[in-house]
Image: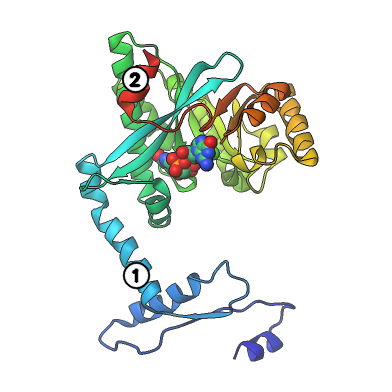
Amino acid sequence: MLEDITAHAPVPNLSVKLGLYNDIDVSLPLSEICDRAVLAVKSIKHDYKRPYASYDGAVSQQLYKAQMLEARFHSALKNKEFVVWYQPKFEPVHKTLLGAEALVRWKQKDGRIMPPGEFLPVFEKDGLIGQLDAYVFEEVCIFQQFCLSEGIPVLPVSVNLSRSSIFGKDIVERYQKIADQYNVPVSCVPIEITESAFIRSSEVKPVADAFVKAGFELHMDDFGSGRSSLNGLNVLPFSEVKFDKSLIDYIGDAQGDKVLKHTMALMDDLGLRTIAEGVETEAQKEFLIQCGVDGIHGYLFAKPMEESEYLKLLQ
Ligand code: C2E
Ligand code: CA
Ligand code: CA
């Protein structure tokens, strides 16, 4: 079938993928039967060597896991099972604390901490991520309000905004309202947007502009991880660029070093602050200092930590 389809396709080099659902459970509605074939084909979406896949236990288990996560989402949100951890950010020469990034975790009933990689992709697909992002933002505002009221130094804590959240209805107004509710200046809660969101830069620009107009700082996350757009740097109102760990891992490689050095110099010239993410070694830190990096985020200095621990650090 595959050969036949490709041979007669009106496009050269067409890559066809098939999802198969055998042993059909006829009691299921037709839409679900089709969904299972679609699930099977999705499981090989990025596997260019496999032209077809069957719906099987593994696929259904994946689906089952996703459904379980979705089913538990609302009660988990209500019961505050999602907790915010803080990863400090430092100025590298004197190791002065610059602030932190808020990173979500899901605390399970048995105490296990589920990392975001296990649940965020599911919530990104089904759109629940918008509610989770807003929840994290609110928790960070509550934290900043606490620091303000207790006379603890208030340093910016950036929050991640997923690609789909950007296009949420009235996103800027909603975030502004949450910050106002806790009397937190929006400058204390910068927004991180991942580089890959800027492929649609013309659609993102009005939202980015509205955030900046409302007083928020925007940080470009994961810079250099994939489709970096220099054009984005021209037109979008960022104040900080976070270099992805994949670029930092190249430190020590002659070409990699040059890319990093010159890109950092370019950012500096553009008036953008630079942060290096995923710094794990002294050698990386030393090289980054030579490049004039403004801040470092990585296990070398600190891993993400619970709020109580971060509070101690601030104090
Ligand atoms: P990210 O925004 O790029 O966050 C940095 C990730 O790198 C964090 O993983 C952090 O723990 C990890 N990291 C930091 N320093 C090092 C290092 O030196 N070495 C290594 N190997 N890793 C380091 P984490 O916490 O697992 O978060 C993964 C991703 O999940 C985040 O990547 C972010 O994209 C997403 N995420 C986390 N919290 C939220 C949230 O509230 N909303 C949204 N939309 N996404 C979130
Ligand atoms: Ca981030
Ligand atoms: Ca990042």
Element on which disc 2 rests:
helix
Q: Return the residue nearer the eye: 184 or 42.
A: 42
At 39% from the left and 53% from the top, the residue drawn is 118
| Residue type, numbered disc 2 | Leu
Residue 65: x and y in percent read 32, 63
Residue type at the position of mark 1: Gln
Identify the residue at the far top of this view: 151
Circle number at residue 149 = none
Separation (CA) of disc 2 from disc 1: 40 Å
Left or right: 64 with respect to 20? left
Identify the residue shown where x is 59% and y is 46%: 196
In the drawing, does residue 235 fall left or right of residue 255? left
Residue at the disc numbered 1: 61
Quadrant (top left/top right/bottom left/bottom right) for the C terminus: top left
Badge 1 element: helix
Looking at the picture, how far across and down is residue 113, in whole percent?
Answer: 31, 44
- Nearest to N terminus: mark 2 or mark 1: 1
Q: Which one is nearer the viewer's eye here, 281 or 195?
A: 281
Picture coordinates of residue 107, whole percent (x, y): 27, 43
What colour-coding does the image apply? rainbow
Labels 2 & 1 near each other (Cβ < 8 A): no
Query: Where residue 311 is drawn, which disc sits there?
Result: 2
> Which residue sits furthest front?
282
Q: Which of 43 and 14 is in front in this view?
A: 43
For the N terminus, the image quarter is: bottom right
Q: In this view, does 288 lie to the left or right of 96?
A: right
Observer-nearest residue: 10 or 85? 85
Q: Determine whether 145 is above or below 14 in the image.
A: above
Q: Is residue 240 among the parts visible in the rendering?
A: yes
